[in-house]
Amino acid sequence: MKTIILLLGAALLGGCAGTTPTYDARNGDAVRQARLAMTIDPGAGASGDAVAGLDGRAAHEAIVQYVGSFKAPPPVVNVINIGGAAGSGK
């Protein structure tokens, strides 16, 4: 009886063994490759060069406009106008 219990226990513990093939070894490679493809200059933070394209005033105004866009959302527009006055010619 002890032998049967030991064999059954060994068989049950065998199900806990990791049987995943090499799927996990390359998990996330596509995301990492896509991120690297979108990065223009990975070492940009290490250099002391100025950023080309925006001066200080334009960058400040862009940030102010961006932050302000969340304070007052744009008005809701009713696109579907069934039975309304628009286009009825009255």
Image (spheres, grey):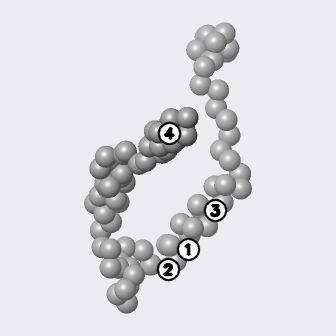
Mark 2 touching mark 1, by CB under 8 A? yes
Q: Nearer the viewer, mark 2 or mark 3?
A: 3
Mark 1, residue position: 60
Query: Cα distance, mark 2 to mark 1?
Result: 6 Å
Label 3 environment density (alpha carbons within 10 Å; few <14, some 14–19, many ≥20): few
Vertical placement of residue 23 versus 63, above or below: above
- Residue 88 lies left or right of residue 49; in this view the side is right
Q: Residue at x 53, y 66 (%)?
A: 62
- Residues under numbered marks 4 and 3 in contact, where contact means CB atoms less than 8 Å apart: no
The furthest residue to the front: 1
Which numbered tag is attached to residue 3? 4
Is 17 placed above or below 61 here? above
Badge nearest the viewer, 4 or 3: 4
- Mark 1–mark 4 distance (CA, rounded to whole Å): 78 Å
Tell me, yes or no, whether the two marked residues, 2 and 4, touch with CB atoms within 8 Å: no
- Element class at badge 2: helix
The answer to which of 25 and 65 lies nearer the viewer is 25
- Eyeballing the image, is 64 above or below 52? above
Identify the mark at residue 67; answer none if there is no mark. Answer: 3
| Disc 2 versus disc 4: nearer the observer | 4
Identify the image quadrant of residue 2: top right
Q: Earlier in the sequence, mark 2 or mark 4?
A: 4
**CB contact under 8 Å: marks 1 and 4:** no
Mark 4, Cα crowd under 10 Å, few <14 / some 14-19 / many 20+, is few
Q: On residue 56, which mark appears?
A: 2
